[in-house]
């Protein structure tokens, strides 16, 4: 989502005759797009601002702006700690950036962190610029979140859930296709809720069906859906929408029902397992990835082992495992019984090691199969090779000529490692 926001901001600035600079040293304006979902992302911004402070001493005319959800959440702290910041723009202030930059250019510190529920974040912003040869793009389908998982800052920094009109989404996808893009990922914190607030209401499955009709589009994906309301209708789409890729990211967070309850996730591990079963019936080749939080306040060894066992039982293709960090203002922040850092890291390493084995095993099952790969660029494996992705979102490296960048071709899988596959052209 942040990558998408940055693309939209870059397009807006270019519309105002600003051009990308070759390096921070040559820039007149530096904007940091920030994330506050986890402590690590927040820490990175504070250390980056420490570096930029020194750059501003050498170039006093430089304007430094901080945007995104950390800016939304910690504007006062940032302004107090870093005198070098000229402007702060929150998650819903993107379209007002030119005005804020003008004000900052006049020497006044500009701050806009209004969260206005009735306003579409991207209204008035040009579409992101499509780079030559670009085949994949993100398109926002909704913003905000009403779920209030107890550990999560998103509802506080991105505001309430708000769906875009389907016509606007279809139009943006059409424009992407006209620019040569064939692989679209729809973004939303909880796409299953898409359309509930629109009039007439429309489901996310309806939206996918409309997009499936678009000529020139070959791959359609979405992130993220919430297990509580992953509907039968949406699951069925994996069986009958031929452009919908065989891949879903379905955040689990924990395998312990007690912890899931404390997290306010409102589903049980059994319910989650049932969803996976349904998905695998509808689309046997589907790849499943998920998010896990270890060390949520009060997580015992028993809870942790339940998560471990559950991961083994499901056999995820990949996992994003995080250790819990307090997010100021969330309900979990005030819970007792915080887990010591050392234990959180032990649990994180434990699950990462477990998942590495499972990922490798799942990838090895693909050896000998022929898969359609959309090449997106040169492979880091060396010259003469390209890298691409399968519909199941696996990275494939393959010796191939550069003319195949942007093309979908059949590749026979010969080797598998934890994070990628290697193959040869058919
Ligand atoms: N909307 C998605 C969902 O329902 O799961 C996820 C969005 S969240 C921005 C991305 C991931 O960050 C979450 O799935 C969770 O695993 C992780 N996360 C969020 N808050 C966290 C926290 N306080 N500590 C550690 N990880 C966190
Ligand atoms: Fe955060 Fe996702 Fe829960 Fe919304 S559904 S509160 S974005 S974790």
Image (cartoon, rainbow, N blue to C red):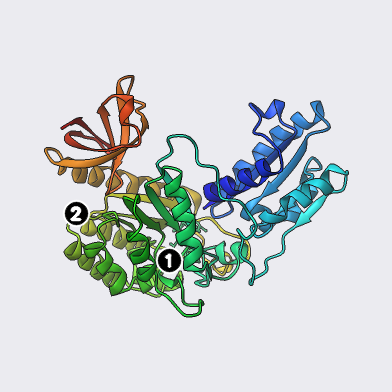
Where on the picture, by quarter, is residue 123? bottom right
Q: Residue at x 56, y 62 (%)?
A: 154
Q: Ligand 1: does it lie within 8 Å of the C-beta at label 1?
A: no
Q: Secondary structure at mark 1?
A: helix
**Towards the viewer: 347 or 133:** 133
User: Does label 2 point to a residue whose CB lies under 8 Å from ligand 1?
Assistant: no
Query: Residue 141: percent from the left, percent from the top?
Result: 48, 62
Q: Nearer the viewer, residue 179 or 79?
A: 179
Q: From this viewpoint, which residue is outermost toward the bottom? A: 200
Please say if 220 is above or below 278.
above
Q: CA distance from mark 2 to mark 1?
A: 22 Å
Determine which quarter of the picture holds residue 115: bottom right
Expressed as whole percent of the image width and height from the top left, the position of residue 36 reads 59, 53
The residue that appears at 78% across and 46% down in the rendered structure is 101
* Callout 2 secondary element: loop
Q: Residue furthest left?
A: 368
Residue 366 shows up from this direction: yes
Task: Find residue 224 and report its horizontal and vertical position in percent.
Answer: 41, 60
Furthest-right residue in this view: 107
Question: In the image, which disc is placed on residue 285?
Answer: 2
Asked if residue 411 is positioned above or below residue 316 in the image, the reply reads above
Few, some or many residues within 10 Å of mark 2 (<14, 14–19, 20+): some
Whether residue 188 can be seen here: no
Give the quarter of the figure containing the C terminus. top left
For label 1, the residue is 191
């Amino acid at each position: 989502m942040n990558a998408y926001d940055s693309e939209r901001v870059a397009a807006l600035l270019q519309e105002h005759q600003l051009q990308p600079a070759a390096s921070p040293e040559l820039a007149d304006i530096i904007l940091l797009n920030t994330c506050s979902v986890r402590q690590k992302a927040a820490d990175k911004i504070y250390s980056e601002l420490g570096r930029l402070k020194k750059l501003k001493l050498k170039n006093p005319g430089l304007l430094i702006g901080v945007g995104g959800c950390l800016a939304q959440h910690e504007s006062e702290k940032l302004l107090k700690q870093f005198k070098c910041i000229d402007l702060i723009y929150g998650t819903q202030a993107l379209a007002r950036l030119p005005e804020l930059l003008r004000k900052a250019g006049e020497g006044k510190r500009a701050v806009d962190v209004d969260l206005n529920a009735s306003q579409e974040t991207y209204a008035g912003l040009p579409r992101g610029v499509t780079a030559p040869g670009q085949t994949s793009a993100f398109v926002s389908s909704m913003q905000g979140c009403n779920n209030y998982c107890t550990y999560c800052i998103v509802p506080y920094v991105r505001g309430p859930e708000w769906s875009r009109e389907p016509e606007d989404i279809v139009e943006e996808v059409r424009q992407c296709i006209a620019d040569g893009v064939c692989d679209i990922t729809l973004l939303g914190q909880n796409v299953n809720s898409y359309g509930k607030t629109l009039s007439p209401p429309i489901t996310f499955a309806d939206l996918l069906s409309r997009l499936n009709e678009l000529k020139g589009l070959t791959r359609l994906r979405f992130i993220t859906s919430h297990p509580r309301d992953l509907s039968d209708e949406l699951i069925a789409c994996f069986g009958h929408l031929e452009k919908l890729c065989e891949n879903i990211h379905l955040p689990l967070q924990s395998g312990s029902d007690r912890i899931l309850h404390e997290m306010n996730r409102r589903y049980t591990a059994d319910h989650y397992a049932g969803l996976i079963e349904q998905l695998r019936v509808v689309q046997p080749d589907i790849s499943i990835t998920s998010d896990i939080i270890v060390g949520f306040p009060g997580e015992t060894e028993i809870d942790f082992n339940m998560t471990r066992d559950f991961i083994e039982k499901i056999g995820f293709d990949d996992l994003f495992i995080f250790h819990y960090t307090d997010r100021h203002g969330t309900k979990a922040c005030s819970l007792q019984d915080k887990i010591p850092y050392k234990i959180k890291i032990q649990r994180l390493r434990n699950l990462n090691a477990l998942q590495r084995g499972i990922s490798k095993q799942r990838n090895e099952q693909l050896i000998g199969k022929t898969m359609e790969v959309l090449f997106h660029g040169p492979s880091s494996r060396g010259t003469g090779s390209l890298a691409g992705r399968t519909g199941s979102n696996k990275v494939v490296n393959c010796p191939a000529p550069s003319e195949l960048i942007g093309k979908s071709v059949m590749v026979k899988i010969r080797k598998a490692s934890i994070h990628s596959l290697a193959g040869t052209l058919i």
